[in-house]
Amino acid sequence: MQRNKGMAVLSYFGLLILIPVFIARNDPFVRYHINQGLVLFLVDILAGIVGSILSFILGDIGGFLSGALGIVIFVLFIIGIINAVKGEMKPLPLIGGIEILK
């Protein structure tokens, strides 16, 4: 279980998600966190694009909104890691219901 927790934690570190995908994707616990990490990674990319557009259009206000969005994503990242370390399969707030991997 300890190794699986490590693989689950790696699922939240962007492209490092490939390590658990290739090594432990058949473990239901790791697969759950791979899905959560993948959703978070995609939301982070989308937030970066939207944040850049907002900053360009709205200037300082857009920059503030972009920064606030970045903080929310960072908090979700921390929650995901804490859940993985605790051995829990709890969905992330706001985005945890999105399922990419079956």
Image (spheres, rainbow, N blue to C red):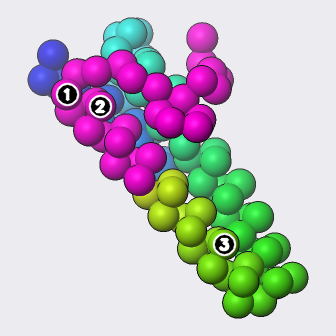
Q: Quadrant of residue 44?
A: bottom right
Find out whether the residues at labels 1 and 2 contact each other: C-beta distance under 8 Å: yes
Q: Nearer the viewer, mark 3 or mark 2?
A: 3
For residue 43, which numbered disc appears in the image? none
**Is 64 left or right of 38, judged from the image as shown?**
right
How far from the left and from the top, in percent, is residue 90?
A: 39, 23
At label 1, which amino acid type do we have? Lys
**The magenta stretch spans residue 59:** no
Q: Residues within 10 Å of mark 1 (few under 14, many from 20)?
A: few
| Residue that badge 3 annotates | 65
| Residue that badge 1 annotates | 86
Label 1, label 2: how many angstroms apart (C-alpha)? 5 Å
Q: Residues within 10 Å of mark 3 (few under 14, many from 20)?
A: some
| Residue that badge 2 annotates | 83
How far from the left and from the top, in percent, is residue 48?
A: 67, 65
At label 2, which amino acid type do we have? Asn
Q: Nearer the viewer, mark 1 or mark 3?
A: 3
Q: Residue at x 54, y 29 (%)?
A: 96
Find out whether the residues at labels 3 and 2 contact each other: C-beta distance under 8 Å: no
The image shows residue 68, relative to residue 7, as above or below, that is below
